[in-house]
Amino acid sequence: MPSPEPSRKLEGMILDATALIDFVYLGEWNWLEKCYDPLCIAQEVLDSDNLEPQTREAAAKYLTPIVLDTEAMFQSLIDFSREAPLLSIADRSTLAIAQHRFLLCASDDGLVVETCRKRSIPYVRTLRLLTEMVKTEYKTVSEVKAMAQMLIETRGKHISQQVIENWYLDLEAI
């Protein structure tokens, strides 16, 4: 499958379940909409029984559900299941939609990120989005550091100490 042409502009963002849950905790939907509109989600993520009511409500309010609607998307779904059999159907759908709709894929799931790299699908992780909040002067360095700590302590998000330390150094250089 060819990757999106490098010169082609991304047409929004698609969030996987990890990014959705992060932003439910962060509550920064206005900033995300302003910078990455339209915000989308694979219908298969919404169909998951694992979403809490608050997460499902936020998705309905802020994200546009997208279904697999072309043969090419379905073929990518099958290809992803062969390449990375541990990906959930929701993750494979998210990747297929991102690839064919030219959407930035927001995820912190290691297997999703690895698949994005292999397939040249543009992706962004939560710490990068927090960095962008500083670069756009929406938040201060101390505010995004507190947001990351909240995700770790309240949400239970795992971010290695080395990644956090490197991120702090990067933030200080902004």
Image: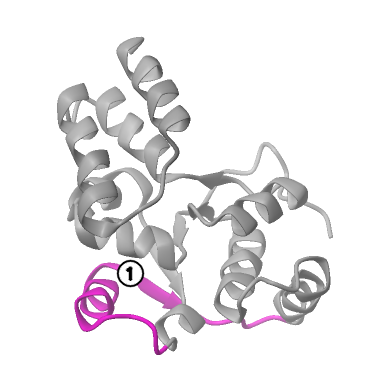
Residue at 42% over, 68% down: 17
Check disc 1 and report its element: helix, strand or loop: loop
Percent across and percent down for residue 44 are: 50, 83
What's under tag 1, amino acid-wise? Answer: Leu
Q: What stretch is highlighted in magenta?
A: 49-70
Percent across and percent down for residue 37 are: 35, 54
User: Split into 4 quadrants, where in the image is the N terminus?
Assistant: bottom right
Check the image and tell me how it is coloured.
one colour
Left or right: residue 105 compared with residue 141: right
Quadrant location of residue 8? top right
Percent across and percent down for residue 116 are: 66, 52
Quadrant location of residue 145? top left
Q: How many labels does the image show?
A: 1
Is 45 situated above or below 120? below
Residue at 28% over, 52% down: 33
Residue at 39% over, 83% down: 50
